[in-house]
Amino acid sequence: MVTMSGSVAERERSAGTGGTDLLTVGVEEEFLLADPHTGTAVPAVDLVMEQVPAELRGQVEREFQTSQIEIGSPPGLDLSSIRHSLSMLRAELADAAERAGVRLLAIGTGPVDGPVPPVVDKPRFDRMIERFRLLVPGPGNNGMHVHVGIPDPDTGVQVLNHVRPWLPILHAVTANSPFARGEDTGYASWRSVEWERWPSVAPTPFLESHEHYERLIRQLIASGVMLDEGMLYWYARLSAKYPTVEIRIGDVCPSVDDAVLVAALVRALVATALTDVAAGRPAVNTDHHLLVAAHWRAAHDGLEGEGVDLTDGELRPAWELLDRLVDRLRPELERHGDLDRVTDLLGGLRRHGSGAARQRAVFARTGSLVDVVADVARQTRG
């Protein structure tokens, strides 16, 4: 995880419980480094890091594989500041990648077949490989993590319970990895399929308390499915480093517009949960297996197909479920000053389709994954 700059005190002051305070939001994004001619993943992270301006290196970090690199925006109250940070970091990193002879791609997984790049040389990663062996995925496993400020861990656990039924539709919004190993996988988010092979990847369980949360972490580590708390790969969790809830379901978004939209929706979702907690409204304990099914459907269909309506288990158009979410979040979108921007960004998403749909549209026109990679690189830079 990169260091998200900004004082803890500032984030704590901004983490309200449904009152007048606005919530901070910060974004982490992981990218693939690819050969500009073939589109294959390239183990070039060290070369790219050498080209990153010194003043930005605190916001750029190596990830698991040597073909990956990560950025983190400073936490902010204003979506415009988040947009500015992500735009600047993406542009600087794309320039650094170009100077290193590679392309920066905001894409969930490597679309072109090729050798799996080696893992970054870190003792922790070595231990992960030793224990989990062939679970280590193919080229790239690039996600987006959104951090939203909370007042304290006990409240944060209640927020986790409230947000879990709404995460599958956000999963669909972020789907951005339809191709892998040189072919269409049939999924909108193949990254999700590969990622979910890890034993600690799952919907967040319904939690009784912060003590219950901490107890589960200890038990999972003792069982061997996790080396440490950093391997708690639930779709929503409490950050181990910051006073935030971390939503971590999605593929990295292709464009800054897409990322800003997801950040706004996640912040409004957490703010709505905080309001419910403050009002004493109980969270809905959605059945775990139905949640698993809803996330599978989101990964398979993305935004262009159907999703599971968790109120009755029936299939509905994914856009209908997204519209329902936005209606639910409208008061907090308005309170944070985000509603007009979100409305505009949703209009763009309707016109252009999800990241997965855009990739497939390019391939349908040209029949070339190299062209898909070039288009993703264009969107990444913005």
Image: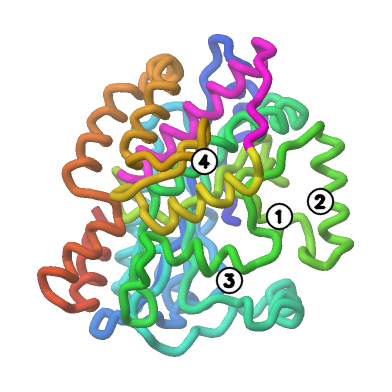
Q: Position of residue 68 (x, y in %)?
A: 48, 70
Distance between the Cα atoms at labels 1 and 4?
17 Å
Q: State the mark number for residue 217.
A: 2
Residue linked to disc 3? 64
- Point out the tag, 1 or 4, that comes first from the N-terminus: 4
Badge 1 amino acid: Leu
Badge 3 amino acid: Phe
Badge 4 amino acid: Leu
Distance between the Cα atoms at labels 1 and 3?
15 Å
Question: Closer to us: mark 1 or mark 4?
Answer: 4
Q: Position of residue 160 (x, y in %)?
A: 65, 35
Distance between the Cα atoms at labels 2 and 1?
7 Å
In the rendered structure, are the residues bearing label 2 and label 3 in contact, judged by CB atoms less than 8 Å apart?
Answer: no
Question: Closer to us: mark 1 or mark 3?
Answer: 1
Q: Would you say residue 280 sits in the magenta stretch?
A: yes
In the rendered structure, are the residues bearing label 1 and label 3 in contact, judged by CB atoms less than 8 Å apart?
Answer: no
In the rendered structure, are the residues bearing label 2 and label 1 in contact, judged by CB atoms less than 8 Å apart?
Answer: yes
Q: Secondary structure at mark 1?
A: loop
Q: Is residue 381 left or right of residue 76?
A: left
Q: Would you say residue 113 sits in the magenta stretch?
A: no
- Point out the tag, 4 or 2, that comes first from the N-terminus: 4
Question: Closer to us: mark 2 or mark 3?
Answer: 2
Task: Write the residue at 32% across / 81% down.
Answer: 182
Is residue 56 visible from the viewing direction of this image? no
Task: Write the residue at 51% across / 19% down.
Answer: 22
Distance between the Cα atoms at labels 2 and 3?
22 Å
Magenta part of the chain: 258-286
Residue linked to disc 1? 232
- Point out the tag, 4 or 3, that comes first from the N-terminus: 3
Q: Main secondary structure of the magenta part?
A: helix
Question: Closer to us: mark 4 or mark 2?
Answer: 4
